[in-house]
Each structure stands twice: as C-alpha cells, then as structure tokens.
Image: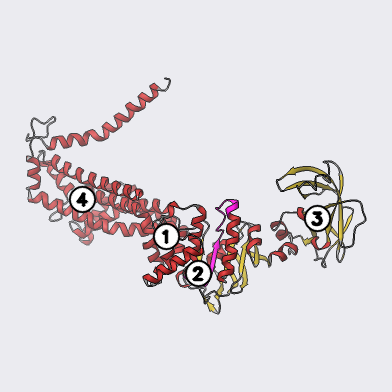
Amino acid sequence: MTQSNFVPVRLQDITKSYHDFQALKGVSLDIAAGEFVSILGPSGSGKTTLLQIIGGFTRPSAGRVFFGDADVTLLPPQKRDIGVVFQNYALFPHLSVAENIAFPLRARKTPPERIQQRVARALRSVDLAGYGDRPIANLSGGQRQRVALARAIVFEPRLILMDEPLSALDKNLREAMQMELRSLHAELGATIIYVTHDQREALTMSDRVAVMKAGRIVQIDTPRGLYSRPVNDFVADFVGESTLVPVERVGVRAVRLGSAVLGCPRDLAPGQLCIALQAETLLLCGDEPAEPGTNCLEGTVGEIVFQGESLKASLALQGGAEIAIRIPSHHFNARALPASGSQVRVKLHVEDTVVVPVTA
Amino acid sequence: MTSSLPRLLLWIATGAILAFLVLPIGIVIIMSFSDSRFLTFPPPGFSWRWYAAYFGDRDWMDATLNSLLLASLSTLICVPVGTAAAYAANVSASPLLRRLQIVLLTPVMVPVIILAAGLYMVYAQVGLNATKLGLVCAFSMMNLPYVFISVLAGLRSFDMNQENVARSLGLGRFAAFVKVTLPQIRPSVATGALFAFIGALDETVVSIFIAGGENQTLPRRMFMSLRNEIDPTIAAISAALITLSFALVVLSSLRSKTRQGA
C-alpha cells in the first residue's frame, strides 16, 4: 500500500431525529487524514447513530458529511469505500476466511489472481497466514476480530469505522488488540473513527477523543487534554476515575474545599464549580509545610481495599465529602500505610487540580 | 421410583396423540390397496386396481396436473412477495408498516368459507371464476402468510449488521441481500415455500367455489366424486398425495441437516 487512499472527514452540523426523539443535535467534527479519533460516550449519547451516518447506513435529518472535498451525505454505503468493523464482527458465516476477506475485492470485480495476492497479504498483516480455508465457525474471538479487520482494510478504503470492536474480547486480549490496532493505524496511515464507551480504550488508542452526551459533542481533545482539562463535570466524571466534590470560589485561581484553599492552574470558569479528585493524583504526605505548587487536603482514612497492584483507601474530608486515594501495594509502601481511622494529609499538584463548572 | 407413574401417563398420552395423528393416514393407505369395490375396512384382499383406476383416468390426471401447475405457480409468486414483505417488516422502523403486517395475516385468520364466498363474488364481477389466473391469485393470497411468517422468523435471528457490512464492502442493497442474507435464511425460505406449495395442492374449499370446467383441481374433483360414488380410488389418490407431501418434507429436512453438518 504505497499510496494511501485515506481522506480527511468533515461533519457539518449533523442532526438526526426519529419521530419526536432527537438522537443528534448539531454535531460538527473535523478529522484529518490519518488521524485516529474516538467517539466516546455512554449508551444513548448518539455515538452509534453518528457512526451509522458516516457509514451511509442512515441519512441525517440535516447537515452534511464530507470525505475530503467530496460531499458524500447522500452517497450509499457501497460507494463510500469505508472499511467497517462492528462489535460482533459481522463476518459471513457461510463463507470461509479467505472468501470473507475477498468479498470487497469480488464486489469491485478485481481480477482473481490479484484477489489471491491481496487476500494473502491481508492475512499476513493480521498474523493469520494459512487460515484462509477455515470456516468462520472454527475461529476464536480474537481471530474473528482479525479477519474482520483484514476484510475492512484489504480494499484500501478511504476511511475505517469501528463500532466497539473489542468489547466482546476478554481483558488481556483486548489490551493486546488495542496495541495492535495502534500499530496497524501507524503502519497504514489510516483515518480511523472508533466508537466506544470505554474511556481507557479511547485514551489508549486515539489521537483525539470526542466525548458525546445526549446527541452533542461536549468536548474534543487529545487524551491528555481531556484528562487534565475537562470542560465540565460530565467529562471529568466520564474520563478517569474521579470523585466530584463541590467547591467554593475564593479567587481567580483558588477554591475552598472544607477548610483547605486550593490553587488552580487556570482561571476559573464562571458559575458553580466542583473539583474532580482522581485517586491516582493524591499522594500521602507528612506534616511538613507545603512546597509551592502543591495543594494539601486532610481527612480520615476509612476502608482500605487490596486490589492487586494497588490499595484503594477511602478518605473522609473535613466537610463530609468522601474521596478515594490509591497507594501502590509494593512493600516500600507497607511501612507508611495509614491505619483505618487515622488522620492523614494528602498532597495534590496544582497542575492536577482539576476544577470544572457544574452543568445542569 | 416415584416418577414412574407420571412417566407412564406421559407415555400413554404421547402414544394416544401420535396414534390419533397417524392412524387415519394409515387406514387410508391400507384401504387404497383394497380389492373391494367399496370403502370397507379392513379390506378383504390386496390389489393395485384403484391406483390403476387413478393413473389410467384422463380426468383424474388432468385435475392432478392442473393442481400441480397451480401450486407451483402460486408458490413462485408467494415466495418472492412473502420474502420481500418479511424483509420490510423486519427492517422498517415505521409504525404504519408494523400495523400493516396484520393485513398480511388475514388469509389465515378469516374463515376459509368466508374467503371462498368473497372470492367467488368478486371473481364473478371480473370474470375470473374457473380461470387459472383466478386460482393462482387466490392460492398465492391464501399461502402468503406461511412464507411471511417463516421468513420473518429466519430474519429475526439474522444479524442485519452483516448486510450493512456487505454494503460498505461495495455491494448494492439488493446484491447484499442475495449474496449475504439469502444464503443464511434459505432454510426459512424453503420451509415457507414448502408450506405454500402443499397448502395450494390441498386447497379444497376455495376451489369448490371458484374452480371448475377445464380448470378443475384435484381436491375439488375428489370432493365431487365422494358425493356421487364411493370407491377406493379416493383412497389411492389420497395415499399418492400423502406420499408426495411427506417426501417433500423429508427431503427438505434432510437438506437442512446436511447443511448443518457441512
């Protein structure tokens, strides 16, 4: 694949209504050629409808879809040249592995000897060389996943769409496949739009992540940006493992939580505020005076739960809010482990102090 | 052995039901080999004479061939129409279309005698009584629900994403249906077709009203002949029909079994 067919994708103010229900309320999105963008959202947020519209399976009620400069809004799926991988793979059970992968080539009337070459190459690229003659029913979940992937890339599509393709796999396989998808993405230079409800998966794989809620894109940013600069409490809650606690504004870059005053890295948004406390960013510390750039909180340790590589302790702050801290479970930490019921101090870097406006 | 009594009762009930289903058929088949001039049971002796009487008689043969032709033609109409209707009912989100499904099922809900009388009156107006066209239309209408229900059941367990994928891979909607969906719902389509065919072959009540003259059907001729003379030819014909239907059902179930094995 010397010359890439992959195109930028632009969504312009897409709306979709079903009877009196608005599934999408004006979604605009610009995706560069070769970019890996995830659409992240809880179920019912409209992410699958959006994918259906990009794929051409559903027409938007209003708005336009562009592939490069071409308006494809009304183009049927077979004319869009998109590789699609669905959650359940949607392999054709009445065809063999090779026939499944040859399917898009046959549909394009590729000469048989070219088909054979390209199927063999696609099988190699997903590490399934020699599996061509197998029936689909004899493959494991991970192998099916690879066949679906091979079928989606073999015809050199303009775009690859994936709808929760890893959700049916077990955890270890899923993490391995995430890495494989990333390297495949880099290798092909593919434009990939990836729909998922798993925030970790989205953060792991994407160049950018679009977070959706109730038919709208709430925020689109790099994984790091999304994690450290969420635009509101919804994003902060959905991305990362955090506890939201209401805080009081006491300055342009300062808030009060209980008796503690915390500095913030950026000017605060207007309106009601809350702080997103992530268990991983809170570190136990002693009674020494705080260094500059550090915020401190005090609380009482509650239950401590062993979770394998780490311990999770709940911490009741002054003022009543309950948050969680995470302590790596290696033995260097064992000595410093606070007892349940003891009073502790934790520190939090100013850059990790995420204060977001509360949406209604 | 606390379970032995309920078990015994279950066996007896099952045996009784099976006997009730199979015995009448057995009796008809035995009587078809009778050498008596009358429909008596048990038959006094064995002979093939009533089969000879059936296969040697031109009127019987005409009616048989006509029935086979009508059943084939009406199946050819039922299957594509019923499949298309089931497809639409399966994919459409329109509430209107969902309600229209009921209309498709009316032929099995309305008493046949009413259907027959209605057809007769409508056909009398447009001159379709005792025509092949009229009979094929009537049979197609009556057997459409069987194809519809059978194919719809097949489609319900089919993953429509497969068709979406086939479309994204470069096939038009109809081609995607033919290459991906149809091969997988083929058993349901075949079952629907089988029921439509046998239904049309057996149809009596509507035939009595709207068939006739050159366009006689076999069941109608049998009914007429039962009224006039009672001889074991009827038993021979019945046995032949039963054999045909049975063979079709066995063939189709064998086919689906080899398919699963592959």
Q: Which amino acid does label 3 sit on?
A: Pro
Q: Left of A360 or right of it: where is A46?
A: left
Residue at label 3?
A: A246
View extreme (bottom): residue: A69
Does label 1 or label 2 sit earlier along the sequence?
2
Q: A158 or A213: nearer the eye? A: A158
Q: Residue A338's spot in the image, x, y percent? A: 83, 44
Q: Residues within 10 Å of mark 3 (few under 14, many from 20)?
A: some
Q: Distance between the residues labelled 3 and 1?
A: 58 Å
Q: A203 or A316: nearer the eye? A: A203
For image coordinates 71% across by 59% down, the residue present is A234
Does label 3 or label 2 sit earlier along the sequence?
2
Q: Residue B97's spot in the image, x, y percent? A: 43, 58
The part of the chain drawn in magenta is A155-173
Q: How far apart are marks 1 and 4 (CA)?
A: 55 Å
Q: What residue type is labelled 1?
A: Gly
Q: A148 or B145: nearer the eye? A: A148
- Assign the C terminus of chain A to one quadrant of the image: bottom right
Q: Mark 2 lies on which chain?
A: A
Residue A132 is labelled as: 1
Q: How far apart are marks 4 and 3 (CA)?
A: 80 Å
Residue A212 is labelled as: none
Q: What residue type is labelled 4?
A: Ser
Residue A82 is labelled as: 2
Q: Residue A232's spot in the image, x, y percent? A: 74, 62
Residue B207 is labelled as: 4
Q: Distance between the residues labelled 1 and 2?
A: 23 Å
**Which element type, helix, strand or loop, lies under badge 3?**
strand
User: What colouring style does the render use?
Assistant: secondary structure
Q: Which of marks 4 and 3 is in front?
A: 3
